[in-house]
Amino acid sequence: MRYAIMGSTAQAIRAAGGTNISEQKSVGIMYADLSPEQAKVLARRTSVVVTPVRDVKLHVSPPTPVPASLANSMTPESILAEQDFEEWKKYAGIPVDGEGIDIAILDTGIRRTHERLGGMVVYEENFSSSSTAEDVYDHGTGVADIIHTMVPKSKLLNMKVIDNQGQGTEEAVSAAVDRCIEMHTQMYQYAPNFICMSLGSIDDGNPNNPIRVACRKAIDEFNIWIAAAAGNDGPNDNTITCPATERYVCAVGSCSLPDLYIESYSSHGPTKEGLTKPDVVFIGKDVLVASSKDDVAQKAASGTSYATPFIIGMSDIFRQIARAGLASPSGTPYYNQTIPYLNPALQIPNDPTMEQMIDEYCPYVCLKPSDQPVRGHISEKDNTYGYGIPFSTLALQFMSSYSTAAVMESFLQPVMSIMMLGMMVGMVRPLFSKR
């Protein structure tokens, strides 16, 4: 049986009878084949943690497939248009197209030659049991498509951890995270700032789960932001999957347009350790994405798998603005130059952390169905919607030194503003009344 081992040495593992030993130095985990009896002997040693290695699966694979409708599908561009996404990007006044940001996609592989990806897949490595890093299962290509649509100049790293049948192991996933960290320590050409995981395993309530340990190391010590699909095992409670169960891995649920209802399949919290999850939700229903079948193929897809890359793209843009240091290279604050609306009192650091993003920023930029976006709000987190869906108008309000109305007036015709706000208010009021 395969085990993950922390706090031991290869010599001690061999002495306990372990074989086929491998080490992931960056995350501090070793793996070995042990019998249950040998594992118990090793675990008796002080500070040694021994955990059985489990399988992980995609959130669109059996036993919880999510059907999608091609007739009702929307492209990532059309979904983002509902958020006035491009206008929001233009309003920033500086390039927010992902340049200088690298994103690792831990998935089934990516068809790097697909026309929708613009040649931005710059690295690939296969950690799965399959013989190729290609996307045979046809999942990771669609995830990459959404990210590339939002931040077309971000470099994409294809880290294949799920095999051609849609299955993988915790060892493969932690190995890919280990490599992402290693790229930072070795000053590699492409060192990922973000990791996108549309996969998971059943919540075991174990903080020493190897994927969670690897994610925690990446987040806490290297400030790599990680978003993971919440899972497609809803609507029951306690169905969030690992590693979305980790405190500062952003767990992403799925809702649909035009009413923002949470999808019935989207997993609900709390976690076994009592954490309120998911963290946010986004559109994950009937998304028209690139398919790996050929270089021009597309397909309709649904699931929290496809909500997650939208959140990666939005976080990328937020981080670009923060990374600019709220100041130009000359040292003059941007809000005195090209970002006239930016509120200097925010004191957002150059490189905000996942903890800040989830605990401090999300409550101000997310819309939940009972909110009134024209008046401002602080969203309360729950186990269905998390903080809610990130909404561009609220993000502008949060970051702006002007009023919401002034911000919106700068990029929307007054009549359109009234129509949109009226639509949002009318839409959100009845929604929670049904729950």
Image (cartoon, rainbow, N blue to C red):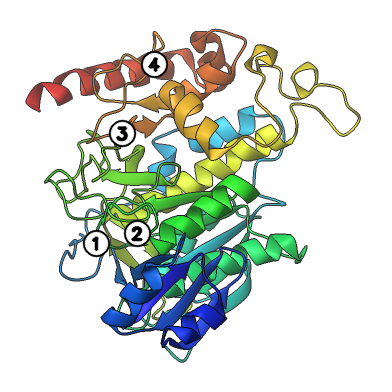
For mark 1, what is the residue? 70
| Sequence-first tag of 3 and 1 | 1
Of the two numbered discs 3 and 1 in the rendering, the one whose residue sits closer to the viewer: 3
Comparing 299 with 285, the one in front is: 285
For mark 2, what is the residue? 288
**Which residue: 30% across, 45% down?**
253
Identify the image quadrant of the C terminus. Answer: top left
Q: Where, by quadrant of the figure, is residue 258 drawn?
A: top left
| Sequence-first tag of 2 and 4 | 2
Of the two numbered discs 3 and 2 in the rendering, the one whose residue sits closer to the viewer: 3
Instruction: Work out whether 393 lies above or below 99.
Output: above
Secondary structure of the residue carrying tag 4 is loop
Secondary structure of the residue carrying tag 2 is strand
Disc number placed over residue 378 in the picture, else none? 4
Q: Position of residue 193 (x, y in %)?
A: 62, 52
- Whole-Å distance between the Cαs marked 4 and 3? 12 Å
The kind of residue on which mark 2 rests is Leu
The kind of residue on which mark 4 rests is Ile
| Sequence-first tag of 1 and 4 | 1
- Whole-Å distance between the Cαs marked 1 and 4? 36 Å
Q: Are marks 3 and 1 in contact (CB under 8 Å)?
A: no
Secondary structure of the residue carrying tag 1 is loop
Q: Position of residue 134 (x, y in %)?
A: 48, 82
Q: Where, by quadrant of the figure, is residue 297 drawn?
A: bottom left
Disc number placed over residue 20 in the picture, else none? none
